[in-house]
Amino acid sequence: MRIGLGQFNSVVGDLPGNVRKIQEFYTRALKEKMDLLVCPELCICGYPPEDLVLKKHFLEQCTSSIEQTAAACPDMTIIAGFVETDGEESYNSAAVMYGGKVTKIYRKGQLPNHGVFDERRYFQPGNKPLIIDVGGITIAVTICADIWHLKWLADFLKNSMPFDMLVNISASPFGYGKIDVREHVIRDCSLKLNCAVAYCNLIGGQDEIVFDGRSILTESTGKTITKAKAFDEDLLIADIVRTENGKVQIKPLIPAVPQPKNTIDEIYQALVLGTRDYTLKNGFQKVLLGLSGGIDSSLVAAIAVTALGRENVIGITMPTQFNSPETISDAGKLAKNLGIEFLTIPIQSVLQAFDNSLKTVHGWESKGIAYENLQARIRGTILMSLSNKTGSLVLTTGNKSETAVGYSTLYGDTAGGFAVIKDVPKTMVYELARHINTIAGWDIIPSDVLTRIPSAELKYNQKDSDSLPDYDLLDEILKGYVEDDKSAGQLIQSGLPKDIVLRVIRMVDKNEYKRRQSPPGVKITSKAFGKDRRLPITNYYKSGSDMTGS
Amino acid sequence: MRIGLGQFNSVVGDLPGNVRKIQEFYTRALKEKMDLLVCPELCICGYPPEDLVLKKHFLEQCTSSIEQTAAACPDMTIIAGFVETDGEESYNSAAVMYGGKVTKIYRKGQLPNHGVFDERRYFQPGNKPLIIDVGGITIAVTICADIWHLKWLADFLKNSMPFDMLVNISASPFGYGKIDVREHVIRDCSLKLNCAVAYCNLIGGQDEIVFDGRSILTESTGKTITKAKAFDEDLLIADIVRTENGKVQIKPLIPAVPQPKNTIDEIYQALVLGTRDYTLKNGFQKVLLGLSGGIDSSLVAAIAVTALGRENVIGITMPTQFNSPETISDAGKLAKNLGIEFLTIPIQSVLQAFDNSLKTVHGWESKGIAYENLQARIRGTILMSLSNKTGSLVLTTGNKSETAVGYSTLYGDTAGGFAVIKDVPKTMVYELARHINTIAGWDIIPSDVLTRIPSAELKYNQKDSDSLPDYDLLDEILKGYVEDDKSAGQLIQSGLPKDIVLRVIRMVDKNEYKRRQSPPGVKITSKAFGKDRRLPITNYYKSGSDMTGS
């Protein structure tokens, strides 16, 4: 029996486009004489469809789209995910299609409702296993989270045992290092159920999340035999052959493709795909961004060039008297290295005009936080004006460390349509920049940018370290507090300095309002700001209260 | 048996403050010789606590807070909501306290996960009824949504029947007209279970939602006997007396308080409380807003004055050459009528400075959308500068109609901390303005403001109707599409003009990105933008596709 795992870039809401995509894979699969084509979870409508599922008309179109797919692809068994409705309730389902019809349906049993997931808002869980036979191979059909609850799954399938292979269609978002966890889950599943596993994952960027593909074929020994591409569409083909001991063997038809080299490499690829898909899927071709000569905007520009091509990226430097000649020159150097269009729009005269107007208000001063934020907001306004004029998307350049503690100006440097590195801590920003230079084989990002002491340059001789702890320490605290939900007490007991821990936590807590108005960006860690981490703005809870007694 | 329903303004995360509040009600209840004090759902931690529930330390403090409450209030039975944890899972629970201890716990059985609710993200459902006896009256304890699933509830409680009274502790958010639905649910519940119902609801504003109180006592005949205050703290006291037929009668100790006069009145009160609580609970005393002389900003200013006092509201007019003398004068007149501080900061010179800088970019023009948006962004920047300088919260003045279709400038008129009327359609804005003038007995909001043709005044002779359908029609389409999730086909079949329906739907769909970066505001309709309506930004779905065939 020949199987193909068709991991493709399904677009949310694009029912006709997604149906066409399955047909394309089907055409390739026919040529390859496949018996079974597997496509990802909810690939008919894209993942996650969110409140589209509450629209009756959308549900009807999901049904007609899966029927249309079945009719167009009659000569092979296809398994593909869609939103099923029985008129009352909706289900996250897998359709089994053959002979021009939907022949069987499996409803997902485990509906994740944590992190970025809201499946219980939309779906009812299924409660019936589905075993199908394709070319003499018996197959249990499952969907995504089903295999992440192995104890439940073993119980759920116990009356259906034995079967040769388990198929799992997934929409499993990227997080760095998560591939190892996923492979572990698949290995455990194959061992526990004593069967091969064919795991088919979505690829593509969708608002805050990126799906990384890397579909997997594993034998019942727990051994991963082959893996599809990371962050790209792919059709992974293998023969499933029964051996003398009754088990099935997996024989790939093509050699395995290279996988990301390391963690930083996979993060880089995730950021590139997330940026490309957000831009293009939202109807933009070009992006623009402010280039300060600092590391954050340099990294974002480099990512944008890889994602969209140098001809589609515009860098703008907007100096005031507070910007050093070195950073201005580095911004230009970076733009030249990347080969992108570069504009200089000095904003000193605009700053002066604002200052004159605001001076009429009692107490206004041409210095201090308000005056510093004003500069950032002028830049945000210039970028948005150019965006409105040219139809380019503004990329925001803030990193996770500053997003966490609110070291940013709302409507200033936070302004834009997509915040490429909002989930990348500052220390990782440096790693990514070095990685880019390593891949390139030369200093695309000028070495000065990597070594200069970070500064917002909103007043003379300003340094990030005037307001923030060292980034190594800050990022360690943020990982513990934001990603691992540790309390102040736990962090301090682990050896982190009490005063800084308490200060950082206070900053994170009180800046929820800024994050709420920030653009989306690619999730790459185990917990990103956005729908992954939902905290009230109005919130008296003091997360340091186990240490301060208040 | 004497019962008190203690509806109070519980603050999210303020465990010590909420415990103190219960103690205050307890002290009053003692004086009134009560036997049972009922407090709202999750009142120990506030509702909704969102991802605070994922913090182990928060859960521990919820437990210690409820124990502390029990210890401080020994001489009466108290029922109050808290987050319970068994170390593994969390529950939305009601503690029954007496004699200084938590004596019994009921776990909510029905966990809402629709609209603004995410309870299945946090809680496991309970599966055991709880019947208690207070002074010879048998009571079934339930929590909020439990009574909204009457068929389930009747089955759940069938082995516990009969009992005299059902207590329901709630955190039921306000929506206009919802009080009727709620009373209907309570009536059905009392009739079906043949018991009295004591319903205790939270009050207060929490980010996007407002709780309206109006706790209710209903007899087993389904008759509402008395109701607590709307939008204010209250302690509703009554004697529960057994009659000769075995049923219980409800005898209120104090006459019923006046309720909101009509729908517009209750919406007005909701907006006032929502604005007051967001401002004060987030540590602000003062607010500022741009006054254009138009109806939206006039209404918001009037609401702010009621919410916070005239001394805490600052109005700012920021004219350009495009603002008519009439609107500028009306802004001043309104400020004078309200008795608030009023600043004039002309922005023509700033506009000119921006224009000069941007002219260096090829293709920039001193007209068109980009130039219009620029004016709005200058105003947003001025307001934020004053906010940074003075520590006042900026109120945003956009209504639901323009928020829906994106008739606004991101970081311009959308800039601010709280969007007071973001869920109020334009037609309702007029009703509210007239209501305010009616209450006042004179034209606090100048009559010209109510009659002038709406304009953004970003170019000469601009009118909203150049870009938008008439507001009556627009609001009808928006209600159908946004609140009722109707498709284009359904709206057109109901008699609405096809071309306008399709145009409006397209505008709503493509402006999701703007709404995602907008500040929170008070939910008053059955579906508000924000966590109540969760649509992808990246979204190819054409809600008009049932009519256009695409």
Image (tube, coloured by chain):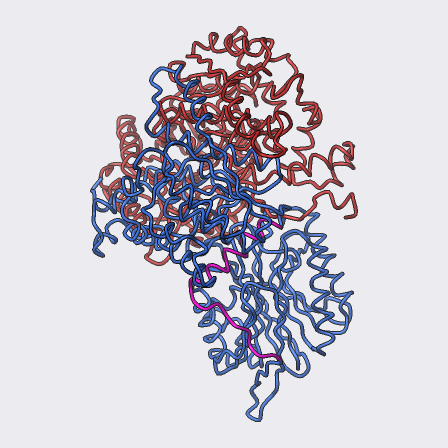
Chain colours: A red, B blue
Residue bounds of the magenta highlight:
B254-280
Residue B144: x percent and y percent? 54, 64
> Could you say where residue B259 lies in the image, as x and y percent from the top left?
50, 70
Comparing A365 with B80, the one in front is A365
- Whether A25 is drawn above or below A84: the answer is above
The answer to whether residue A246 shows anywhere in this view is no
- Looking at this view, name the residue that lies furthest to the top: A442
Query: In the current view of this chain or complex, which residue is farthest to the bottom?
Result: B244
Residue B77 on image: x %, y %:
70, 73
Name the residue at 23% across, 50% down.
Answer: B489
**Residue B446 against residue B73 in the figure, above or below:** above
Magenta stretch: includes residue B462: no
Residue A48 seen in the current view: yes
Tell how many labels.
Answer: 0
Dominant SS of magenta comes to helix
- Residue B145 spot, x, y in % from top left: 51, 64
Viewer-proximal residue among A410 and A150: A410
At x 51%, y 32%, the residue is B381
Quarter in which the N terminus of chain A is drawn: top left
In front of the other: A405 or A523: A405
Give A169 or A224, whichever is nearer the viewer: A169
Q: Would you say residue B269 sits in the magenta stretch?
A: yes
Up/down of B39 relative to A109, above or below: below
* Residue drawn 45% across the image and 24% down it: A383
Q: Quadrant of residue B93?
A: bottom right
Q: Is residue B465 left or right of residue B298?
A: left
